[in-house]
Image (cartoon, rainbow, N blue to C red):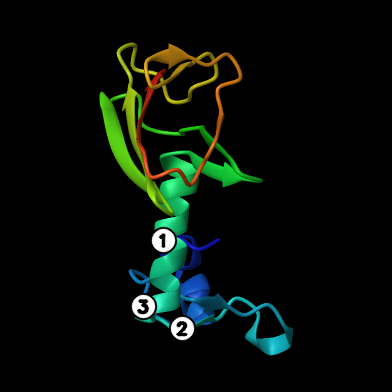
Amino acid sequence: MINPIEHSRTKEAARKYKVEPYVIAADVYGANNLAGRGGWTWYTGSSSWFCKAGLEDILGLKVEAGMLRIEPCISSKWEGYSIRYRYKSSIYNINVKNPDGKCTGENQKFYFNGREIEEKQIKIEDNNSINEIEVIL
C-alpha cells in the first residue's frame, strides 16, 4: 500500500494518485471522491513508513511485548546483513547469515551471546550491556 509504484502502474491509477510516482506518500486517502489519492509527499512521516517497512518487513526485526525476534523476508541472493539495535542502555548487534540462499528464516538457528535459543526470541533488557545475536537462515 505504501509503495508508490503500486499507485501508478496505469495512467488511470496515476491520475487518481496525483502525486509523484517515485515518492512514498505519508497519506493515501480512502474516503469518497479522494479515495486513492496520495498526500504529504516529501514529508518526514512518509520516510518513517519506509524505514518501518524495511526494518520490520524485509529485515524482520520484530520487537513486541519486550521480546525481540528476527523474521526476515529477503532475496535469496543476499548472503546476510547486520543490524545494530539500541534498547535504552543496551546494544544488540544482530548478524544474519544466509549460507543456503533462503528467503525466510522458517527453520533458522538463533544464537544469543553464543548460546543457541530454541524459542528464537529473547527478552530485551535495559542493563547497559552489549549483546550478540546471530541468526542463520
Mark 1 against mark 3, which lies toward the viewer? 1
Please give left or right for residue 19 compared with residue 63 in the image.
left
Residue at image position (32%, 40%) is: 83
- From the viewer's perspective, is residue 136 above or below residue 42? above
**What whole-number distance in Å separates the C-alpha atoms at marks 2 and 3?**
7 Å
Of residues 102 and 83, which is closer to you in this image? 83
Mark 1 against mark 2, which lies toward the viewer? 1
Residue at image position (64%, 86%) is: 34
Q: Quadrant of the C terminus?
A: top left
Local packing at callout 2 (Cα closer than 10 Å; few below 14, some 14-19, many 20+) is: some
Labels 1 & 3 near each other (Cβ < 8 A): no
- From the viewer's perspective, is residue 97 above or below residue 89? above
The residue wearing badge 2 is 18
Q: Quadrant of residue 5?
A: bottom left
Where does residue 10 sit, x and y in percent of width and height?
46, 66
Of residues 77 and 88, which is closer to you in this image? 88
Is tag 1's residue or tag 3's residue first in the polypeptide sequence? 3
Where does residue 30 sit, x and y in percent of width and height?
68, 77
**What whole-number distance in Å separates the C-alpha atoms at marks 1 and 2?**
20 Å
Of residues 131 and 77, which is closer to you in this image? 131
Provide the secondary structure element on which disc 3 rests: loop
Local packing at callout 3 (Cα closer than 10 Å; few below 14, some 14-19, many 20+) is: some
Provide the secondary structure element on which disc 1 rests: helix
Which kind of residue does numbered mark 1 sit on?
Phe
Local packing at callout 1 (Cα closer than 10 Å; few below 14, some 14-19, many 20+) is: some
The residue wearing badge 3 is 20
Which kind of residue does numbered mark 3 sit on?
Glu
Where does residue 67 sit, x and y in percent of width and height?
59, 38
Q: Quadrant of residue 45?
A: bottom left
Residue at image position (46%, 57%) is: 52
**What whole-number distance in Å separates the C-alpha atoms at marks 1 and 3?**
16 Å
